[in-house]
Image: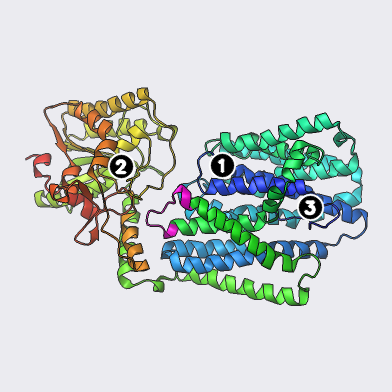
Amino acid sequence: MTLESLDQNARHYRPEIDGLRAIAVVAVMLFHARIAGAAGGFTGVDIFYVISGYLISGIILRETAHGSFTFAGFYARRARRILPALFAVMLASVAAAWLVLFPAAMERFGQSLLASLAFGANFFFWRTSDDYFAPSADLDPLLHLWSLSIEEQFYIFYPALFVLLIHRGRRFLLPSVALAAVASFALSEVLSHLRAGINFYMLPTRGWELLAGALLAVSETRARAPFALSRRLREAGSCAGLVMILAPMAVIDRSVPFPGLFALPTVLGTALLIALATPETFVGRLLASRPMVAIGLVSYSAYLWHQPLLAIGRAASFAGVLDMPVSLALLLAAFALAALTWRFVERPFRGRGAMPLRRAVPLGLGVAALLVAAGAAAWLTHGLPQRYSAETLALTQQFQRFKDENSHCLFSGDPKPLDQACKLGASGPITIAIIGDSHAAVIGQAFVPELDRRGQRAESFVWAGCPPILRSDGMSAERQDCPPFYRSLFDYLRAHREIGTVVFHARWALYIEHTAFDNGEGGREIADPESPPTPAGKVALSQSFRQAVEAMLAAGKRVVLIYPMPEAGWDVPLYLVKASRYGFWMPVPTTSLARFRERNREAYAALDALGERPGLVRAYPERGMCPQSAQGRCLLVHGGRPLYYDDDHVNPDGARFALPDLRAALGP
């Protein structure tokens, strides 16, 4: 987020740049709100970087030329510009987080707050998630401060080096800055294919965007001739620049390696607009219009406010996601708060009549100390759990423990040898294999009572996100590792004749439909979007499901084929906890049986197509979760206890509730 802004009455003020800021901040805000059509809105940050490099370099060049530049003055202006609004938003975020965030999220918030105060948010989010685009990132109130940290790191090193180059002779300035920009761009392009997280979050791979603005500022002082173009050329160049910044916002998405080559149109387009969108051009007049300038003037505060509002809103909602009208309302609230912040927080610390340093410094230090104390308290107490009742904590901790324990049984991530699979059952010979994705890992809990009764055990071979298939036809790119895993697994099972029964289960509809679940009643799963399936891909995938089952039948195994498990849409434990926390009376959540059947229609057809085979047994979780007594509904809670540990995985209680009697399925 660009920090630098010349006061409106300053000699070099350009309203067109405020218009550019308006485009940039609206794009980023729409992206974080997950508004359709703004998948590339994150490129707004790149616009800010070019503007920042241009303005900062121009200020340093002018002040050194007049002999008025001092580092003390430079950093005092930066502090006055950055810290008042930042501290105000941080204080409000602390208060909101106290009211809304659960202990694990509050602990993470405290850590991110401390990192942001040290201008190291980019390091924190890189180390703890590495994926700016992951759905879970939507719940981080301070996620957006990674870009602010990069700018501040730039300001630590750049001014001294820039001034040194100026004093050594301005003839060295342009080639030196150009060489640094090219080196940074080259590093970014290389790392975009090798270490995407580092490339996205780090100054060395972002520096070329700031230096592009610096190059423009240096070029203007070297010779104005390149920019003294005819009006027709300025019109054409500024229109081209506008297209170059707007098109990526609508065209690119998280799938492209970024930054690097894909950031080049935005960076060059911004440079063209700064250079050529003068008041004599149509684009210049558009950018300098009153609405655009008004948004641009409050863009810094709007940027600060929008992500905490969206993240806290998501955390407070029962579904964990926001509908478009709510998201847009929160963005409007961000602009309203930004206008108030600009008037009552930013302006009193800047320009004529600004608060003197003897008052501003103690005030800033006091607020900073308060924020550090709040962040440390949230971190060191593991999220201030004393805010919640013992019953609430027990509920959340129970399912968090189950998630953690369940993750140890997955082969994905850091695959382990097949003979080290998790075992289910107390003791006895291993006679059953459970295979599939993370849903299969959970469903294995339903077998434990029957295994214990028989004195047998099962092995759990599960790969999160991977259904049991032997070919990659119809699968998305991130699941291309699935077939090799299952081919190796099937060889293992053929070699172990004592394993006579193989249980197949997966979230079948997800792989066929490529869509996260929306229960149509306010509960929507938080998940990465997937590319839409093709009809041919659906057919190929259905065939691959069947071929995997047939392979085990041909190997002489008894196959238990478990049909789809109803999905919830809501994170069921959190739904119950929030209802208790807020003091609301909320109906016990259920979902529509008709909606379940429609979503799983093609999955049922694919599994039904296997027909009746010797050794093939089917089990239907729907019959347990959606009994006739529920009158067309599927149960998510039973006896006051949740049957799910999130929005689509059942917990052990849910697994046993869905499949209460597996004796017939497992055979004699």
Percent of width and height locating residue 65: 92, 53
Residue picked out by circle 3: 56
Upstream in the sequence, badge 3 or badge 2?
3
Q: Secondary structure at mark 1?
A: helix
Residue type (three-letter) at the residue carrying disc 3: Ile
Percent of width and height locating residue 281: 79, 37
Which label was assigned to residue 140?
Answer: none
Find the distance from the CA under tag 1 to the CA under tag 3: 28 Å
Q: Measured along the vertical axis of the image, is residue 444 above or below residue 72?
A: above
The front one of 375 and 360 is: 360
Asked whether the viewer can see residue 326, the reply is yes
Residue type (three-letter) at the residue carrying disc 1: Ala
Residue type (three-letter) at the residue carrying disc 2: Val
Residue at 37%, 71% (x, y): give it: 388
Whether 317 is among the magenta residues is: yes
Circles 2 and 1: CB distance less than 8 Å? no
Asked whether the viewer can see residue 143, the reply is no
Upstream in the sequence, badge 1 or badge 3?
3
Q: Nearer the viewer, mark 1 or mark 3?
A: 3
Find the distance from the CA under tag 2 to the CA under tag 1: 27 Å
Upstream in the sequence, badge 2 or badge 1?
1
Judge from the rendering whether residue 111 lies leftward or rightward of residue 509; answer left or right: right
Judge from the rendering whether residue 381 lies leftward or rightward of residue 437; answer left or right: right
Q: Nearer the viewer, mark 3 or mark 2?
A: 3
Percent of width and height locating residue 625: 19, 48
Q: Tell me which segment is drawn in magenta.
A: 315-326
Which label was assigned to residue 462?
Answer: 2
Residue picked out by circle 1: 196
Question: Which image quadrant for residue 535?
Answer: top left
Question: Which image quadrant for residue 374?
Answer: bottom right
